[in-house]
Image: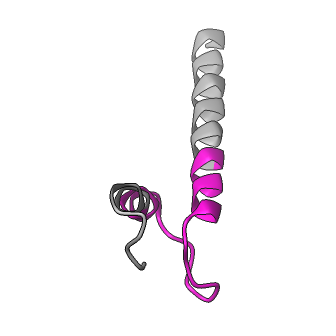
């Protein structure tokens, strides 16, 4: 059981780290203040489009 608890704790830390990184990425993307928070996949897709063509309006 201890082994499973350690694995669960590692996974929680991994997901928290990923969520923190996505939250930081959201702050760097151009969005309107009144828009709802983007989902993880929306964040990644907007970032991908922005990196591919930074001069394009979003």
> Magenta span has 22?
yes
Quadrant assignment, res 23: bottom right
Q: How is the image coloured?
A: one colour
- In the displayed structure, 43 sits above or below 32; it is above
- In the displayed structure, 56 sits above or below 10; it is below
Q: Nearer the viewer, residue 17 or 57?
A: 57
- In the displayed structure, 55 sits above or below 13; it is below
How many marks the image carries: the answer is 0
- In the displayed structure, 31 sits above or below 7; it is below
Residue 40 picture location, percent across and down: 46, 58
Quadrant assignment, res 10: top right
- Residue extending furthest toward the top: 3
> Magenta span has 19?
no
Residue at the (61%, 61%) spot, across then down: 28
Residue 45 picture location, percent across and down: 36, 60
Residue at the (40%, 55%) spot, across then down: 51
Q: Nearer the viewer, residue 53 or 33?
A: 53
Residue range corresponding to the magenta coloring: 20-46
Quarter the C terminus occupies: bottom left
**On the rendered structure, is 54 left or right of 52?**
right
Quarter the N terminus occupies: top right
Quadrant assignment, res 24: bottom right
Residue 53 picture location, percent across and down: 35, 62
Residue at the (44%, 58%) spot, across then down: 47
Residue at the (33%, 56%) spot, across then down: 52
């Amino acid at each position: 059981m201890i082994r499973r608890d350690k694995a669960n704790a590692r996974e929680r830390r991994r997901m928290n780290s990923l969520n923190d990184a996505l939250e930081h990425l959201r702050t760097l993307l151009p969005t309107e203040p009144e828009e709802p928070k983007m989902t993880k996949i929306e964040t990644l897709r907007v970032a991908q489009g922005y990196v591919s063509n930074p001069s394009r309006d979003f």
